[in-house]
Amino acid sequence: MTDEDRIFLEKINEYAEKVLGDIDPQKTHVSEQLEKLRPIMQQLAMEYKMPVEDVFIKYMDLASTANAEADASFREKYGENDIMDLPI
């Protein structure tokens, strides 16, 4: 992931923390969550000169990549077997 990609992702994540902080993602429809993120996605669409739909797709791709990187880092740090021993 490039530095520009990280900045892009951070902008959306920071905004999401502000507007989605009080909601339960398990109980709130994805469409409602996306509607709350629309302003930042529209802002980034204008900034990056791309359609809002492409901003959403890029966000989903970058979020997946960031999660995979975090998971790999966690597994590297704690090892595969140690994960099973962690308390729940």
Image (tube, grey):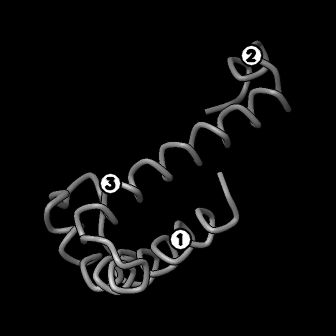
> From mark 3 to mark 2, how far is it between C-alphas?
31 Å
Instruction: Determine which residue is flagged by label 2.
Output: 80
The answer to which of marks 1 and 3 sits earlier in the sequence is: 1
Label 3's element?
helix
Percent x, y for residue 73? 76, 37
> From mark 1 to mark 3, how far is it between C-alphas?
12 Å
In the image, residue 46 sits, relative to residue 21, either above or below, namely: below
Instruction: Determine which residue is flagged by label 1.
Output: 8
Label 1's element?
helix
Which residue occupies 70% across, 31% down?
72
In the image, residue 72 sits, relative to residue 23, either above or below, namely: above
Which residue occupies 59% across, 48% down?
66
Q: Who is closer to the viewer here, 59 or 45?
A: 45
Q: Quadrant of residue 65?
A: top right
Furthest residue in direction top, as rendered: 81
Q: Give the amino acid at mark 3.
A: Ile
Q: Give the amino acid at mark 1.
A: Phe
Percent x, y for residue 17? 46, 76
Left or right of 11: which side holds 24? left
Q: Nearer the viewer, mark 2 or mark 1?
A: 1
In the image, residue 13 sits, relative to residue 29, either above or below, namely: below
Percent x, y for residue 78? 83, 28
Q: Who is closer to the viewer here, 70 or 47?
A: 47
Q: Who is closer to the viewer here, 24 or 33?
A: 33
Label 2's element?
helix
CB within 8 Å, label 1 to label 3: no
